[in-house]
Amino acid sequence: MRLLVVEDERKLNLGIKRGLEHEGYSVDSVFDGEQGEIFGEDPSYDLILLDVLLPKRNGIVVCRNLRLNKVTTPILVLTAKDTLEDKIFGLDSGADDYLVKPFKFEELLARIRALLRRLPTSLPSRLVLEGLELDTITQTVSIDRKQIDITLKEFRLLEYLLRNVNRVVTREQILDHVWDLSFTSFANVVDVHIKNIRKKIGAKYASFLKTVRGIGYILKDHE
């Protein structure tokens, strides 16, 4: 899942970003309303966390404009305003939920999970390719019912490949969905993670994961 955080308090913004990334989400963050609206129009985001009191453009205005532009991405409004009138105003502007600051990170996670479950195109939580199984709820991978050790990034990469079985995915698409816009590490990071995944899933399933030279990778449902 890819999330967007629009919050001008830098410490809070980056704290939310780090916390969500630790939970396995891919997260981008911006710090004003204008950027929030521009980024928010990207349909690849699964959820937007939107502060109200933002520089350059108020969060409620951003929310309203996104809805007017037919953006259907769920929006969770974050604000210090806690009156009933403020909540009604935010929800009437197109927000899907409203969380008052200060809040516990555990509550934020619960609200996010609840909103993601409402998505009309909810994706299956269990992905299977013969004896290879991936469970997004427990965040586990097993081969012939035997669980294997896998890092969070390897898990997200394998999930993306399984959701796109028999489709070629480029390295850029993988970086976009598994990492985030601020990622600046070494250029062959995708290839390194693919190599590690091949080792962990065993020779049989590694043979299903093909390199498309100069483009990216494809996971086929048969050798």
Image (spheres, helix red, strand yellow):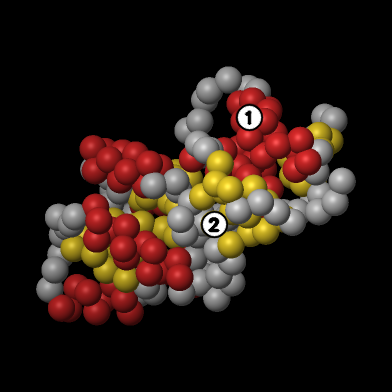
Q: Secondary structure at mark 1?
A: helix
Q: Quadrant of residue 9?
A: top left
- The residue beneath circle 2 is 135
* Residue 190 in sight from this viewpoint: no
Residue pictured at 67% horizontal, 58% vertical: 128
Q: Residues within 10 Å of mark 2 (few under 14, many from 20)?
A: some
121 left or right of 28 in image: right
Residue 52 at x, y percent in the picture: 26, 59
Looking at the image, residue 131 lies above or below residue 172: below
Looking at the image, residue 63 lies above or below residue 105: below
Q: Residue furthest top?
A: 186
Q: Nearer the viewer, residue 108 or 31?
A: 108
Q: Residues within 10 Å of mark 1 (few under 14, many from 20)?
A: some
Residue 11 at x, y percent in the picture: 23, 37
- The residue beneath circle 1 is 196
The amino acid at mark 2 is Asp
163 left or right of 40 in image: right
